[in-house]
Image (cartoon, rainbow, N blue to C red):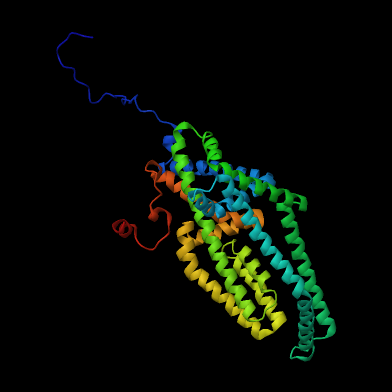
C-alpha cells in the first residue's frame, strides 16, 4: 500500500469494471418463482402421503381375512363397552362382567336369528302362494290392459329381468366372496372376532400400553390422548347407531305388523342390521318391506308401507341423525356420504360399515394432536370438530 497522503481521483472517461458482490450466490431454485416452489413442495409431500395411504389400503386388502375380524371385534367391543363399564363400576368381578357381556350378546343375537327362522318357516309357503297370485294378476293386466302385450313379449321381458337379476346376484356373490372368502373363512373370522372381543374386554388397557411403546417416547403423550379421544368417539358412535337402528327397526317392523305385511320380525331385524351402514342401509332394507307389502297385500297397503318407511326415514334424517349422530360422530354429513361411498367402492359392505367409525376416529385423533388438546388432557373444542353454521366468534363467546 502506498504512503502517499494525496487523494486519488478516478478518470471519468476511463472504463471501470462493475464490482461484483461475492456474498450473493445464484442457484437454480432462485430462478423458480416462489409460488411455484411452494406448490411443488406441497405436491411432493401430498404424493408421499397418497403413496402411504395406497400402501396401507393394499396391505389391508391383502390381509382382509385378519383385518375384517379385527375391526368387527373392535366395533362390537365399542358397542358393548358402556354395559361392560357399568358392571365394573357396580363392583362386578372382571371375569363375571366379561362372561355376562359376551354371553348376553350371543344370547340376543341367537334369539333374533331364532325369531327370524321361526317366522320365515311359518309364513314362507303363504308368501310364495301370494307371490304367485300377484305375478299372475300382473301378467293378466299386461295382456288385457291398455298395454296389450303378447305372451312372447312378456316372456321375453321376464327372461331379460331374470338374466339381469342373475348377473347382479353373481356380481354380489363374487364381491362377497372376494371380501369374506368361503364359508370356512366366515366361521373362522367369526371365531376370531369373538376371541378379539374377549381379549379387549379382559386386557384392552394392557394391549394399548404395549402398542403405545411402538411410538417414539416424545410422541407417546399425544398419541395416547388422541387414541383415547378417538376411542370415546367410536364408543359414542356405536351406542348412538344402535339406538338409531333400533328406532328404525321398531318403527318399520311395527308398521309392517299393523298393516298385515308378512314376516315383520325378519324385516325389522334386516332393517336393524342394515341401519349400521349409514345413509343407505335403512333405505335399502326398508325397500324390502315395501316390496313384500306390494306383492302380498296389494298396491294400497304397499303405498301405506312406503309411507311408513318414509316417515321413519324422515324421523331419522331430520331428528336422530342431526341431533344424536351429529354430536356422536363429529363428522360433516357430506363427509359421511363420501366415506361410505368410498368404503363401499374399496371393500364392499365391510368398507361401508367401517368407513364412518374410522373417519370419526381419525378426525378426533387428528384434531386432538393438531389443536394441542392432548397437552390439557381434554377433548378438542366442539367448534374444531362439529360442523356448524354458527360463526366461530359467536361459539367462543358462548363457551
Q: Residue at x 61, y 57 (%)?
A: 353
Residue 79 image position (x, y, % from top left): 56, 55
How far across and how far down the image is residue 62, in percent? 68, 44
Compared with 152, 226 (above or below) is: above
The image quadrant of residue 261 is bottom right
Residue 395 at least partly seen = yes
Relative image position of residue 58 (x, y in whole percent)? 65, 45
Dividing the picture into quadrants, the one containing residue 21 is: top left
Residue shown at the point (18%, 17%) measured from the top left? 8
Q: Which quarter of the image is occupied by the N terminus?
A: top left
Q: Is residue 182 visible?
A: no
Q: How many marks?
A: 0
- Is residue 284 shown left or right of residue 23? right
Q: Quadrant of the C terminus?
A: bottom left
Q: Relative to 24, say whether 258 is above or below.
A: below
Residue closest to the eye, 60 or 323: 323
Which residue appears farthest toward the left when viewing the image? 6
Residue drawn at (84%, 84%), measured in percent from left and top?
A: 151
In which quarter of the view is residue 160 placed?
bottom right
Amino acid at each position: 500500500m502506498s504512503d502517499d497522503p494525496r487523494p486519488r481521483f478516478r478518470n471519468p472517461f476511463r472504463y471501470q469494471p462493475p464490482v461484483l458482490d461475492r456474498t450473493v450466490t445464484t442457484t437454480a431454485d432462485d430462478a423458480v418463482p416462489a409460488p411455484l416452489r411452494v406448490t411443488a413442495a406441497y405436491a411432493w409431500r401430498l404424493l408421499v402421503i397418497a403413496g402411504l395411504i395406497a400402501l396401507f389400503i393394499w396391505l389391508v386388502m391383502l390381509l382382509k381375512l385378519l383385518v375384517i375380524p379385527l375391526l368387527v371385534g373392535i366395533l362390537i367391543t365399542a358397542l358393548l363397552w358402556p354395559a361392560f363399564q357399568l358392571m365394573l363400576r357396580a363392583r362386578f368381578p372382571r371375569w363375571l362382567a366379561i362372561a355376562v357381556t359376551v354371553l348376553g350378546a350371543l344370547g340376543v343375537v341367537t334369539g333374533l336369528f331364532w325369531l327370524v327362522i321361526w317366522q320365515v318357516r311359518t309364513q314362507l309357503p303363504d308368501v310364495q302362494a301370494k307371490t304367485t297370485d300377484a305375478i299372475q294378476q300382473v301378467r293378466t293386466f299386461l295382456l288385457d290392459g291398455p298395454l296389450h302385450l303378447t305372451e312372447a313379449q312378456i316372456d321375453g321381458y321376464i327372461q331379460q329381468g331374470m338374466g339381469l337379476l342373475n348377473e347382479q346376484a353373481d356380481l354380489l356373490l363374487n364381491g362377497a366372496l372376494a371380501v369374506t372368502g368361503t364359508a370356512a373363512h366366515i366361521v373362522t373370522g367369526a371365531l376370531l372376532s369373538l376371541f378379539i372381543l374377549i381379549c379387549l374386554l379382559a386386557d384392552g388397557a394392557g394391549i394399548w400400553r404395549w402398542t403405545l411403546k411402538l411410538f417414539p417416547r416424545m410422541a407417546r403423550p399425544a398419541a395416547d390422548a388422541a387414541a383415547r379421544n378417538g376411542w370415546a368417539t367410536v364408543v359414542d358412535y356405536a351406542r348412538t347407531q344402535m339406538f338409531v337402528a333400533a328406532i328404525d327397526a321398531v318403527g318399520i317392523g311395527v308398521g309392517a305388523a299393523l298393516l298385515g305385511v308378512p314376516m315383520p320380525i325378519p324385516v325389522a331385524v334386516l332393517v336393524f342390521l342394515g341401519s349400521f351402514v349409514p345413509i343407505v342401509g335403512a333405505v335399502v332394507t326398508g325397500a324390502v318391506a315395501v316390496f313384500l307389502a306390494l306383492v302380498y297385500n296389494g298396491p294400497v297397503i304397499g303405498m301405506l308401507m312406503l309411507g311408513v318407511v318414509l316417515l321413519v326415514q324422515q324421523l331419522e334424517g331430520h331428528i336422530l341423525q342431526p341431533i344424536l349422530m351429529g354430536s356422536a360422530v363429529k363428522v360433516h354429513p357430506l363427509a359421511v356420504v363420501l366415506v361410505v361411498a368410498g368404503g363401499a367402492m374399496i371393500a364392499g359392505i365391510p368398507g361401508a360399515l367401517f368407513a364412518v367409525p374410522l373417519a370419526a376416529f381419525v378426525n378426533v385423533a387428528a384434531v386432538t394432536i393438531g389443536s394441542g388438546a392432548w397437552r390439557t388432557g381434554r377433548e378438542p373444542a366442539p367448534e374444531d370438530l362439529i360442523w356448524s353454521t354458527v360463526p366461530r366468534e359467536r361459539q367462543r363467546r358462548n363457551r
